[in-house]
Amino acid sequence: MQMRSHRALLLSAIVGWGCSQAMGQVQTLVPPVVAGAKPVAVEHIRVHGASLEGNLEGDAVDRDVIVFLPPGYSTGSQRYPVVYALHGYSIGAEQWTHEIHVPQTIEGAFAQGAREMIVVLPDAKTVHNGSMYSSSVTTGDFERFIAQDVVSYIDSHYRTIAERTSRGLVGHSMGGYGATRIGIKHPEVFGSLYIMSPCCLSARVPGEKGEELEKAVAAMKAPSDSANLPFFTRAQLASAAAWSPDPRNPPLYLDLPTKNGVPQPEILAKWAANAPLAFVDQYVGNLRQYRAIAMDVGDQDGLRVDAGKLHDVLDKYAIPNTFQVYPGTHTSAVADRFQNHVMPFFSGSLCFRAGCR
């Protein structure tokens, strides 16, 4: 992952999103079906994103959301904590279900002793394949969509414990970035964080010329034209749409990090400002409010170094957290981790009754 060409270096924040263009079809270690596991109910709903209205690239405002209701939900009046699980780049919520093999892994976790909770998978795929869960006039404010629109809808339509200490946030890859970014900024909404193989934690520096991307963009007449571009080119456009939006630069309404092949420091500064390792020190007080924070990453994942740096920052400020480097690649164990680590973590860290602190 130590690539130094301009194209690769600009993408070093996002290479972990998928070394294959078929991210939804990656091979993962799937835990065996747990005997006697009770089925969860699956509901496919749509949530209107007021925070996404008016976005310049025409991304959908009404978003798909998949809700998993625990076995006991239909038979009583009990209220439940909620875990919000964010998908990675190039996939949406439906493909995310296949990567983490839900509902099987949710059912398996419950059967092995995890307490029952609601699990919610919101979709944040955009015209360039990923929102970065960021705030942008070009893509829409996906940070607020997750932290406000989706949470408010779930609390008003399901029997939830509508308190921050009963809400968990987890994400993988781009979703791990989203969980980091949103978690750092919104402790008033969430009470526990689990960050899986997060991308894009570090500020980046320019490398060689980027005329290839500029030529591709110059030939585009609409954001939807990016569907014909290579995977990594689309990933750069997704980053630019999220972190360097420009309402005066149609048709894509974004600024690239190079112009005529020359790095643009003011644009790279905007990208750097969205790197959690660059802004985390400003939010130490927020992070101290969490009941629990966990992070994991594979030992063969190029994102391992930056994940370790974030763990070191938390340790530096004496913010309680756990960090595990497990044997595997970026995606090889994501389903197993979800059943056997993520769900038990929230079972032990979330509040299962109102008024719990």
Image (cartoon, rainbow, N blue to C red):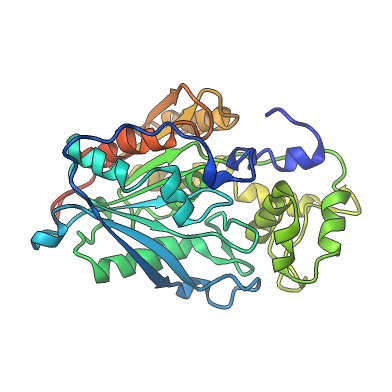
- Residue 174 shown left or right of residue 250 in the figure: left
- Residue 311 shown left or right of residue 66 in the figure: right
Residue 290: percent from the left, percent from the top?
Answer: 32, 44
**Is residue 200 at all visible to an observer of this figure?**
no
**Of residues 72 and 262, the one drawn nearer to the viewer in this rendering:** 72
* The quarter of the displayed image where residue 246 is located: bottom right
Q: Residue furthest right?
A: 260
* The quarter of the displayed image where residue 14 is located: top right
Q: Residue furthest bottom?
A: 54
Residue at x 71% of width, y 27% of height: 2
Residue 296: percent from the left, percent from the top?
Answer: 43, 31
**Of residues 129 and 308, the one drawn nearer to the viewer in this rendering:** 129
Residue at x 88% of width, y 50% of height: 211
Q: Is residue 256 positioned above or below 62 on the image?
A: above
Residue 230: percent from the left, percent from the top?
Answer: 74, 50
- Residue 63 shown left or right of residue 350 in the figure: right
Residue at x 42% of width, y 28% of height: 315
